């Protein structure tokens, strides 16, 4: 069972604040959720996550109201842009956003014959920026039932691993000024990497809060031997660390971290890093679990608002075939329950239902192995929903 971002079964929450009902769960509530099915397998997997949320609602006495908006290729087809102002505003008015994935086959889709800011993925950048979602949390956990899918040798994975990558999401290279121009007859492209101390401090605080409720270790990843932005990063992280004496801080250069993740992933608890390094390292961390279809993520702002989405993309190669694994999206919905709605018991119930279905041997095609029972996307969603146990169960 994964520790969750806060550790196994604990009732912590990211933003402090009062614990309702002595931490025993919450009375009936109504959650306003904006769903973004997006492209490719997105609609199939979001449908299953909503199925599970509805079961949580009926089992625990809550109700979830959904408003669907378009983003990505489907929005380009409908409106000519990957995200309209109206769609962004609808997301702003919600309590939380559940996203499938956006994008098509990059080498073979009309959506990519246009300027970068009109491509499907520009919708993602715009919504992250527009909702101020600066903290991206991606757990990477090895399910013992799926250990055979892990590409690492058994002696490396040992007792498994359970880590969280905390990636800064709205600064750095992806949001810096960029241009391409001719200089002395030669084409030259420039991207800029900028961070200010406030941007570093707020993500560092989140990482230390999370580590304090897990195994108490933060590894801050940078390239301080080369980059000024990394030297500032390191300085600010060390300042923040002074406020969390119970958390152990270590620094690691990004190239070393890339190696350590495949040599000894069990050493990591919370990995804190900037945008581009986090993009690459979180994909690496996903892949060593051997099952990208299993990994959820959350992108949060300074309050309780968040956008929740699987770590994988829109998988256009398998769209519409009822073979996509919906578990990453279902676990993302569990993160939503925990962080945006303070519904820890309900989130635990979703995670336990996923674990139960895996223990019973059910697998989608991507995680199928000898002896498993292969089922499709919709059936996996129904099985997980069917195993949600409410408080009286
Ligand atoms: P991908 O994650 O979509 O697919 C990689 C491989 O994993 C494919 O073989 C796919 O079939 C498989 N896969 C992914 N999710 C799966 C699931 N739930 N169940 C079973 N198999 C699954 O990555 P890609 O192929 O590099 O990108 C495809 C599109 O997705 C591109 O347009 C890309 O830009 C976009 N993308 C979107 C997001 C997002 O919306 N957040 C993230 C990454 C990529």
Image (cartoon, rainbow, N blue to C red):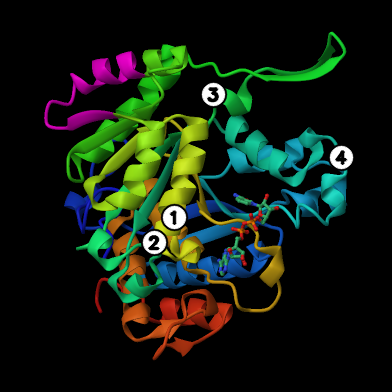
Q: Is residue 151 left or right of residue 69?
A: left
At x 41% / y 19%, what residue is drawn? 230
Crowding at mark 4 (Cα within 10 Å: few <14, some 14-19, many 20+): few
Instruction: State yes or no: residue 242 in magenta.
Output: yes
Q: Earlier in the sequence, mark 2 or mark 3?
A: 3
How far is disc 3 from disc 4 in space, using C-alphas? 24 Å
Q: Which residue is mark 3?
A: 172
How far is disc 1 from disc 3 in space, using C-alphas? 22 Å
Q: Residue 345, can we see it? A: yes
* Label 1 residue SS: helix
Q: Which residue is mark 2?
A: 289
User: What span is in magenta?
Assistant: 234-251
Q: Which residue is mark 1?
A: 286
* Label 4 residue SS: loop
Figure quadrant of the C terminus: bottom left
Q: Which residue is mark 4?
A: 114
Q: Earlier in the sequence, mark 2 or mark 4?
A: 4
Contact, mark 3 vs mark 4 (Cβ under 8 Å) = no
């Amino acid at each position: 069972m994964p520790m969750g971002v806060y550790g196994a079964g604990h009732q912590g929450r990211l933003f402090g604040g009062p614990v309702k009902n002595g931490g025993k769960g919450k009375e009936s509530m109504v959650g306003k959720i904006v769903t973004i099915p997006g492209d490719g397998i997105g609609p199939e997997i979001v449908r299953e996550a909503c199925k599970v949320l509805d079961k949580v609602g009926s089992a625990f006495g809550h109700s979830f109201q959904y408003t669907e908006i378009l983003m990505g290729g489907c929005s380009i087809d409908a409106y000519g842009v990957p995200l309209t102002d109206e769609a962004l505003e609808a997301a702003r008015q919600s309590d939380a956003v559940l996203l499938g994935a956006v994008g098509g086959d990059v080498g073979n889709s009309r959506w990519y014959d246009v300027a970068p800011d009109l491509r499907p993925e520009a919708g993602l950048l715009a919504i992250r920026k527009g909702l101020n979602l600066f903290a991206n949390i991606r757990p990477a956990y090895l399910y013992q039932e799926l250990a055979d899918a892990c590409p690492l040798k058994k002696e490396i994975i040992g007792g498994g691993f359970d880590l969280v990558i905390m990636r800064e999401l709205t600064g750095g290279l992806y949001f810096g000024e960029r241009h391409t121009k001719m200089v002395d007859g030669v084409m030259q492209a420039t991207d800029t990497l900028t961070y200010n101390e406030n941007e570093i401090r707020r993500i560092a605080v989140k990482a230390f809060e999370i580590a304090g409720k897990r195994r108490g270790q933060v590894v801050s990843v940078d390239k301080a031997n080369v980059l000024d932005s990394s030297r500032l990063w390191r300085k600010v992280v060390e300042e923040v660390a002074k406020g969390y004496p119970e958390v152990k801080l270590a620094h690691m250069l990004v190239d070393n971290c890339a190696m350590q993740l495949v040599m000894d992933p069990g050493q990591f608890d919370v990995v804190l890093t900037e945008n581009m390094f986090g993009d690459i390292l979180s994909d690496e961390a996903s892949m060593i679990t051997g099952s990208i279809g299993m990994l959820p993520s959350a992108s949060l702002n300074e309050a309780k608002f968040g956008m929740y989405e699987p770590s994988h993309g829109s998988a256009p190669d398998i769209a519409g075939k009822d073979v996509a694994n919906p578990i990453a999206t279902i676990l993302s919905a569990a993160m939503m329950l925990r962080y945006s709605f303070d519904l820890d018991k309900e989130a635990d119930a979703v995670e336990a239902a996923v674990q139960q279905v895996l223990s019973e041997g059910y697998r989608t095609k991507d995680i199928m192995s000898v002896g498993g029972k292969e089922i499709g996307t919709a059936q996996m969603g129904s099985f997980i929903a069917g195993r949600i146990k409410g408080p009286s169960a």
